[in-house]
Image (cartoon, grey):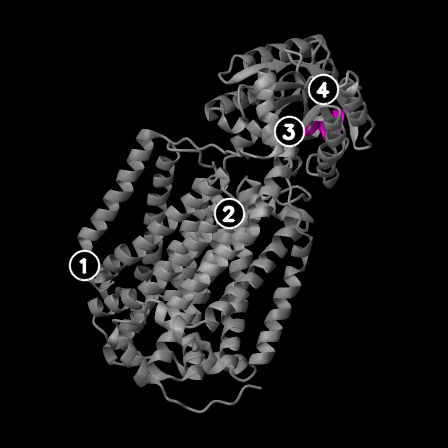
Amino acid sequence: MHSLAQFSTRRPLLVILLWIAAVIGLSAANAAAGSDFRDSFSLPGTDSQAAYDFLGQHFPAASGSTDTIAWGAQDQGVTDPIVKADMTALLARLAEVPGVAGITSPYSAEGAAQVSADGTIAFAGLHWNGQAYAVSLESVRQVGSIVSEANGVDGVNVAFGGQGASRLSTPSIGVGEVIGVGIAALVLLLALGSLAATTVPLIGAMAGVGSAVAAVGLLSNLGPLSSAAPIVAELLGLGIGIDYALFITNRHRRGLKEGRPVSESIIGASITSGRAVIFAGVTVFIALAGMYVPRISFLTGLATSAAITVFFSVAVSLTLVPAILQLYGLRVLSRRERRQLAAGSVGPTPDAAEDGARGLIGRHPIVASVGALIVLGSIAIPAIGLRLGNADQGSDPVGSSTRTAYDLVARGFGPGANGPLVVTAGLSSATAPTALADLGASLEADPGVVAVVGPIPSAAGDAAMFQVVPATDPQSAATVDLVTRVRDTYGASAAQAGITVHVGGAVATHVDFAQSIAKSLPVFFAVVVGLSMLVLALAFRSIVLPVVGAVLNLLSAAAAFGVVVAVFQWGWGHSLVGVGEGGPIEPFVPVILFAMLFGLSMDYQVFLVSRIAELWHATGDNALAVRRGLAEVSRVIIAAAAIMIVVFGSFVTSDSRIIKLLGLGLASAIFLDAFVIRMVFMPAVMRLLGRANWWMPRWFDRILPHIDLDKGDDAAASAAGSATERESEPAPA
């Protein structure tokens, strides 16, 4: 750390030029190579995947995904000669798009049932030559463009829906996010009081995000990477990039106020706060590593892109930030602070700040702890009702093409028509002659089914398939129960007659997706929580603090999930964030959200406790270390949290439901973690525990490497030691 900090301060222009070259070079390479983002939900070993494999073998024409082209003509009807001619021509154009295997028109004998009973709504099935996530995005865009051109012609409302259509709403940085960054800059200016100091975290975050997004774009050409990967990189990079740089900048400013030379202050900040940034980054890495546990390509791709972002954010904070600070010199202090420094009157944190922090926590730690626990527990209550599932396109924003297509089909054919099940039947020599008919009759008799198409035999006659239309919408729990009944009840009965049954379709895929993730959750939590505690034990030479930090992070996560469930599942205030009235939470969201917020929460744990640990090692007085540490770090944590809240909250303006959910969830978690847990709960608990905070078994201490966050900055340690007054404090109430 010392050598790296020295290099950055001695060669600041070289470091800055190297980072400029890195950002420009990676961006140019990404522009030249192009990106290839695809959402892959392949689930080997699941029943839905077996159904798709079966279709590929016996019904190749039906093995790809099917999207919907829906249209409504309320005045003249969809069978009007002019409407029919226009729509037939439109379908013919769509059939010529590369990647489209065929179209089932409602004007054909095969698709006659695709015209509503009142004749005002119709839909066509657009069959891709593979799964929607594997189809060229250019082909999907071409279909969307053709449909958009036809919408409104001759009074006909035309829309494009389905899994492929959902790829057109690829999230991107918009006006809301730009405004969020602007507000973050204002918060920085108010917190630091210097325009020069304000630009340091912003420049650092931009360099980190620019490098990371370009690197993620290049990586997308090497394997399946979700279309949400760039926005996740931007979301995470802006938040932690500003925070990490702010933490080092703030420590440097304190060093200058203590009268240290510029270079010495920067090196000291890089050694102490820089090590804290490394440990914080490692905890985020560990949290993201948990996303590899389910072994689902969609999650591993997001984890990889997020890890790349963390790497660049840490690298920028340890190299580019010290270089910029060196060039700025004393200008990172406000004019008033520079005048005070020249007069020798700038000193440590005022006693008033210490008294304010000590008032509630020092005198009443139990009251503070119980109050914080009540707040977190109350907000977390909705999380008890968390329901995993697929939020269908009925939850998309009103006016979007996918929402319009969904509403048209639901109004004309019932909500279940938006998510039909595909039931495959493998026949054997032992299959009874009437068994296939019995299976069809059982499906038709189910109270959750409104229509059954089939059995449709294969060319070889050794297989058949049914299309089952549920009575309820795709995101309904009743539809999920239907999938389970078909598999467990009807499938088991058919097996006795020699028929092998598999259930596919979008609903079945998401059911299997949820089950696959649920099975991996125990290992996921063990990896994330266990390894994070180990890293903190290494950082603070304590067993107690990592355990307390992990428990409080779990409380923070539960409260964040409570907010997410209340808004996105129960529909509270849904119109304020621009989503539908409510639906289940996508199965992968808890994994992504927990991994990110657990890592970010550990950041604040590291930032707070690292300063308290410095003071503890210098003075041996736990009460003083907690009081002074909180007083000195609280301002920067509040500023950093406010910035993260603004940045994450701005992503609620995105068109993507998932990004809205992640933005609101992370913003809520950071607010609760910073203002309730780190400013109240954690210091109160540390005040109650006293010297027990720093307890570690001797055998464990011997086997852990010794890496002290404050090692190497002797001047800071001396200042901390000389600043201690050792005054008596009132005993905790």
Q: Which residue is drawn at 25% across and 69% down?
A: 265
Looking at the rendering, which quadrant does residue 531 occupy?
bottom left
Say which amino acid is labelled 2: Phe
Q: Residue 430, which numbered label?
A: 4
**Numbered label attached to residue 502:** none
Q: What element does badge 1 sit on?
A: helix
Distance from label 1 to label 2 (Cα)?
Answer: 37 Å
Q: Do the residues labelled 3 and 2 touch (CB within 8 Å)?
A: no
Q: How far apart are marks 3 and 1 (CA)?
A: 58 Å
- The secondary structure making up most of the magenta span is helix
Residue farthest toward the left in the current orientation of the protein: 10
Q: Mark 2 points at which residue?
A: 651
Real-space Cα separation, disc 1 to disc 4, in angstroms: 77 Å
Mark 3 belongs to which amino acid? Gly
Along the line of sight, the residue nearer the viewer: 587 or 246: 587
Compare residues 93 and 526 and report the one nearer the observer: 526
Q: Quadrant of the N terminus?
A: bottom left
> Is label 3 or label 1 in front?
3
Residue beneath label 3, please? 505
Q: Distance between the residues labelled 3 and 2?
A: 31 Å
Q: Can residue 399 be seen in this view?
A: no
Question: Of circles 3 and 4, which is in front?
Answer: 4
Earlier along the polypeptide chain: callout 3 or callout 4?
4
Residue range of the region highlighted in magenta in the rendering: 410-419
In terms of sequence position, does the residue under pointer 3 or pointer 2 come before the other? 3
Q: What element carries label 4?
A: loop
- Residue 729 rendering spot, x and y as whole percentages: 47, 89
Among the 4 quarters of the image, the one containing residue 25: top left
> Which residue matches tag 1?
7
